[in-house]
């Protein structure tokens, strides 16, 4: 069975009742004493509360919609992948500011994200403090549960590191009254990532290969996460400019070895579209996922993915229509006659540009041009079949504010609207579908990236085979059919495999980075990949320059290199620290 994330109120750590301007000023909701809380049952409840934090420490409150744990606003809206969406630029202005890089130390969304993630860290620390009071005789799974809490704490610290860079780092042995004494500049980015990676490696040594309850971290999830963190750490950054200065090949070799630990334990699902089907959510591709559920006895439908609650489109879902794929992302799915991406020219013209006939019906242009099939697995396009829905294809009217954001919506992460597993009404489009933090396709691409940057001939060839494995899964998936004719594909789908001829390190790097974008589109990773590679400024400013032609609200947007790679440390957190915190480069004084 899934690990149950429904937590006893007596041990839940309150977020909504706390002042969000304070960092980790959190107390349990009741007056339970240590004897009760640190009993085996009490500690197990604290552990469950730490797992529940993966959904957001505020649970089903409105704050998690605006501060999503899935990172759609932080990792894709800030990149070339997505627009904010919703009812226009004035609808949730904090996220609009993130999209247009109008961010400073007073932005509430930034302060709340910091607070949210440190609340999650504190849940892990409280559970570890409790575990440290027990013996194996009291608690037979003591070392396993400790490893799980270190795993979760490392996950939350990793999120903090790639969002904020300069962060306070501490464990369960630091008392609450010492928090204001901790600097956010004691450790460098490299040292923080090293500590996080070591937490995962240490956790792997104590975790079992398989857990009896689905959702608990296991040995292989820890190996995979260690690989991801070391991959970030391998790209060394200048602390003043945030720019990449070198790539450490020794760390890349460790990434390869850690990814190899998962060989034979996981595999790709047979069809890309199975990623959004309940029956496959804990299947062979899922390495570590947030376990969601519906109709489990909790309010408003259950423990569903509240982070994505704003994002269901209109139409059959009746949703709020945030988080829309960018035209740039749609163009990236174009292929050449061999089914390979157009690395340098994909954005010279718009694929799937929309015009209208005399009756006002939308007409898709470019329908004969070749395109990667993932476009219609990931993007909702007008006139194209939407999953298994039969009442209509996707319509341009499913987007709330077409003048700002165009006509496309996100197709990932939702069950088909007619499914009995979709909640009827509010919360719009909700279901029990898990959120995949790490899936095996990610692990394969991390390994390929490391092999390419190491640059040895045998490794380059292995990377080619890995990338082709990911592409072959898409090639063999069931293609989306024309809405009116089941015997026709909805578009000219053409995806090919890379050949050995011409597979140089430079070409392989382009292929890997393009594949990473297409395979993980709308998963909240794109911005962080661009920063890791040291190309965020160039890529995003080129994107903005083209988008200005159609998106008026981008007229003043600009990514400032050596600043916008990270969010600022908020004014509220600086005040909480008594002036000890150091601001990230580019943001000036508090």
Image: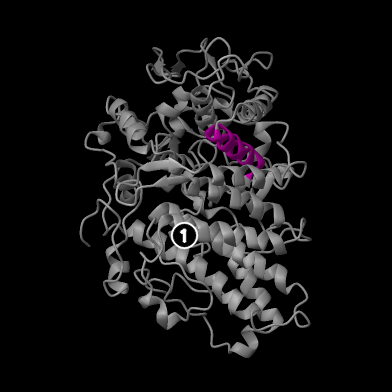
Which image quarter is the N terminus in? bottom right
**Residue 435, percent from left and from top:** 60, 49
**Image quadrant in which the C terminus is located:** bottom left
- State which quadrant residue 37 falls in: bottom right
Secondary structure predominantly adopted by residues drawn in magenta: helix
Q: Is residue 208 visible?
A: yes
Residue 220: give x, y in percent of width and height. Answer: 70, 52
How many numbered marks does the figure carry? 1
In the rendered view, tell whether residue 230 sits above or below residue 7.
Answer: above
Q: Secondary structure at mark 1?
A: helix
Residue 270: say if magenta: no
Badge 1 crowding class, 10 Å Cα cut-off, few under 14, some 14 to 19, many 20 or more, is many
Residue 450 falls within the magenta-colored stretch: yes
Q: Residue at x 46, y 62 (%)?
A: 117
Vertical relation: 584 (above or below) 363: below
Q: Is residue 64 left or right of residue 1?
A: left
Q: Nearer the viewer, residue 141 or 228?
A: 228
User: Which quadrant of the figure has residue 316?
Assistant: top right
In percent of width and height, residue 536 lies at 37, 38
Give the residue displayed 28% in from the left and 53% down from the top.
585
Given residues 22 and 448, the one toward you in this image is 448
Q: Is residue 302 above or below residue 394?
A: below
Left or right: residue 40 versus residue 332 is right
**Numbered range of the magenta stretch:** 439-454
Q: Nearer the viewer, residue 531 or 439?
A: 531
Q: Position of residue 580 (x, y in %)?
A: 29, 71
Q: Which residue is mark 1?
A: 192
């Amino acid at each position: 069975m899934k690990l149950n994330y429904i937590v006893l109120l007596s041990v839940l750590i309150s977020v909504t009742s706390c002042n969000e301007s304070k960092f980790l000023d959190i107390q349990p909701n009741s007056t339970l004493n240590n004897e009760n809380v640190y009993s085996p049952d009490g500690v197990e409840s604290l552990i469950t509360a730490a797992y529940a934090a993966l959904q957001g420490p505020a649970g089903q409150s409105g704050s998690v919609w605006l501060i999503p744990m899935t990172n759609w606003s932080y990792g894709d809206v800030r990149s070339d992948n997505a627009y904010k969406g919703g009812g226009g630029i004035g609808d949730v202005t904090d996220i609009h500011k993130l999209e247009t890089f109008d961010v400073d130390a007073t932005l509430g969304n930034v302060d709340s994200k910091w607070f949210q993630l440190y609340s999650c860290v504190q849940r892990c620390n409280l559970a570890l403090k409790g575990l440290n009071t027990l013996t194996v005789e009291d608690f037979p799974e003591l070392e396993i549960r400790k490893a799980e809490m270190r795993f979760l704490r490392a996950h939350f610290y990793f999120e903090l590191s790639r969002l904020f860079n300069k962060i306070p780092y501490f464990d369960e042995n630091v008392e609450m009254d010492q928090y204001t004494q901790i600097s956010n500049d004691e450790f460098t980015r490299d040292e923080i990532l090293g500590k996080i990676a070591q937490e995962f490696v240490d956790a792997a040594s104590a975790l079992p290969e398989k857990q009896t309850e689905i959702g608990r971290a296991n040995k292989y999830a820890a190996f995979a996460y260690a690989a991801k963190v070391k991959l970030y750490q391998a790209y060394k950054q200048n602390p003043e400019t945030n720019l990449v200065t070198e790539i450490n090949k020794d760390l890349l070799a460790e990434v390869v070895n850690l990814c190899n630990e998962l060989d034979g334990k996981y595999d790709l699902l047979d069809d890309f579209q199975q990623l959004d089907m309940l029956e496959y959510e804990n299947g062979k591709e899922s390495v570590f996922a947030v376990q969601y559920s519906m109709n489990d006895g909790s309010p408003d439908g259950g423990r569903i993915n509240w982070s994505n609650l704003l994002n269901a489109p209109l139409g059959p879902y009746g949703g709020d229509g945030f988080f829309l794929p960018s035209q740039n992302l749609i163009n990236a799915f174009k292929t050449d006659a061999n089914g390979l991406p157009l690395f340098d020219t994909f954005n010279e013209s718009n694929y799937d540009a929309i015009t209208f006939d005399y009756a006002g019906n939308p007409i898709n242009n470019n329908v004969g041009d070749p395109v990667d099939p993932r476009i219609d697995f990931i993007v909702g396009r007008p006139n194209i079949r939407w999953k298994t829905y039969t009442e209509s294809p996707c319509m341009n009217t499913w987007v709330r504010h077409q003048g700002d954001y165009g006509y496309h919506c996100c197709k990932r992460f939702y069950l088909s609207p007619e499914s009995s597993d979709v909640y009827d009404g509010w919360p719009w489009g909700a279901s029990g579908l898990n959120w995949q933090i790490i899936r095996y396709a990610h692990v394969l691409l991390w390994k390929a990236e490391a092999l390419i940057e190491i640059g040895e001939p045998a490794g380059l060839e292995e990377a080619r085979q890995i990338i082709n494995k990911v592409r072959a899964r898409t090639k063999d998936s069931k293609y989306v059919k024309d809405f009116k004719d089941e015997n026709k594909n909805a578009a000219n789908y053409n995806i090919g495999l890379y050949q050995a001829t011409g597979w140089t390190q430079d070409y392989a790097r382009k292929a890997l980075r393009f594949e990473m974008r297409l395979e993980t589109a709308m998963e909240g990773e794109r911005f962080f990949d661009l920063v890791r590679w040291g190309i965020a400024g160039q890529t995003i400013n080129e994107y903005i320059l083209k988008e200005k032609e159609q998106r008026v609200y981008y007229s003043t947007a600009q990514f400032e290199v050596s600043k916008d790679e990270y969010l600022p440390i908020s004014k509220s957190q600086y005040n909480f620290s008594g002036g000890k915190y150091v601001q990230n480069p580019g943001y000036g004084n508090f």
